Image: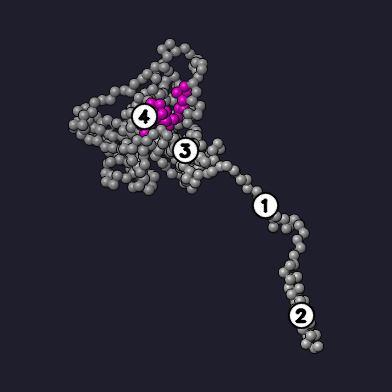
Amino acid sequence: MKKLIFHTLFLVLALTIVNSAQSQFNYKKKAAPVTKDTVATKPVEVPVSVPVVSNVSIDTNIKSTKTIDTTMVGGFNANNRKSLRPNYGFFSENNTRKATQQRTPMAYENLREEDALFSEFVWEEIDGREKINRPFIYQAYDDSGDQRFFALLLRAIEKDGVVPFSAEGGDDRFTKPISFDEVNAMLKGSLDTQLVQNINNPNVFDTSIIYNTKLAPNPDSIYTFRLKEQFIFDNKTSRMYCRIIGIAPVATIVINNKPIKRTLFWIYYPELRATLAKNEVYNPKNISNRITWEELFESRYFNGYVVKSTLDNYNDKMLNALYKDPTKRLLEGERIRQRIFDYEQDRWVY
């Protein structure tokens, strides 16, 4: 009898323990009341329904079909429209403006290599911010387009077939021709691409071109032009001649608040002369008495400072690499110019 009572009590105690354990595992915590604090710290997750596209098989080996250029080059020739009425108050019987478009470059003097007693290559830069050089950055429009000199170079490349050459790595020997599209790409900045899904066909992805405009030169920052020249002393005429070999626009790009000069491209000057002879230069004193760009360069109606020469330059370096002080660079440039001038004058000393 005692054993039966003992087993019964043991069974009741075991059932009590099991029920207590089950009640602990099945306990459900009550939801906390929603307040402003709980909403801000613990946002409620809302289930997101993902739309399923049926009957569309997307190919994993997707290739771009075409290239979409999403940027435009601005700042030059943006208002290149011709006047529909006479733009002058006087009547031109000879139509000198039209005659300008028919001009040809002036003929050079014949220089023979055998008569070249002395010659040196000189690189100099024209700063359009100087008063005498302000026509290089004259911001106005006429029937020929933007009057800035850099815009004239772009028109010569696009319309007159003048070939630009790459200036990458400091190359100024016209070794690598580039296209007009590549010139435009320089004005847009660094290139980047990404794939964009075609709205008409989900299996087709187009390549979209994006340019980092932070590295793109501002149109107003292209005010420096570098000239490559050769000074030649002719033994027959006892005269020093200067022949311009090439012209390169130099842009100023600000990176990390520091201005950095970047040579965009080179143009072979003899090929550019035909375009220069057909375009007139802004005359701040008399708009009716204007000369052509070719006359400006051949008459040297500009001011430049020497940045490099082959005179005593064994390492073929720019003056800014040899002299850190800007004043010393200017003085060295004037010394080079004076030595060339003295060479011609000394030939006439008896």
Number of other residues with Cα within 10 Å of mark 1, as a class: few under 14, some 14 to 19, many 20 or more: few
The magenta stretch is 141-164
Task: Compare marks 4 and 2 and give the one earlier in the sequence.
Answer: 2
Which residue shows up at 40% across the image and 24% down it? Answer: 279
**Residue type for callout 2:** Leu
Q: Secondary structure at mark 1?
A: loop
User: Considering only order in the chain, which callout, 4 or 3, is on the residue closer to the N terminus?
Assistant: 3
Judged by depth in the image, the label closer to the viewer, 4 or 1, is 1
Task: Work out whether residue 147 can be spotted.
Answer: yes
Position of residue 137 measured from the top left corner of the image (x, y, whole percent): 45, 31
**Under tag 4, what secondary structure?**
loop
The kind of residue on which mark 3 rests is Thr
Q: Nearer the viewer, mark 1 or mark 2?
A: 2
| Alpha carbon distance from label 4 to label 1 | 63 Å
Does residue 169 belong to the magenta stretch?
Answer: no
Q: Which mark is residue 47?
A: 1
Q: Nearer the viewer, mark 4 or mark 2?
A: 2
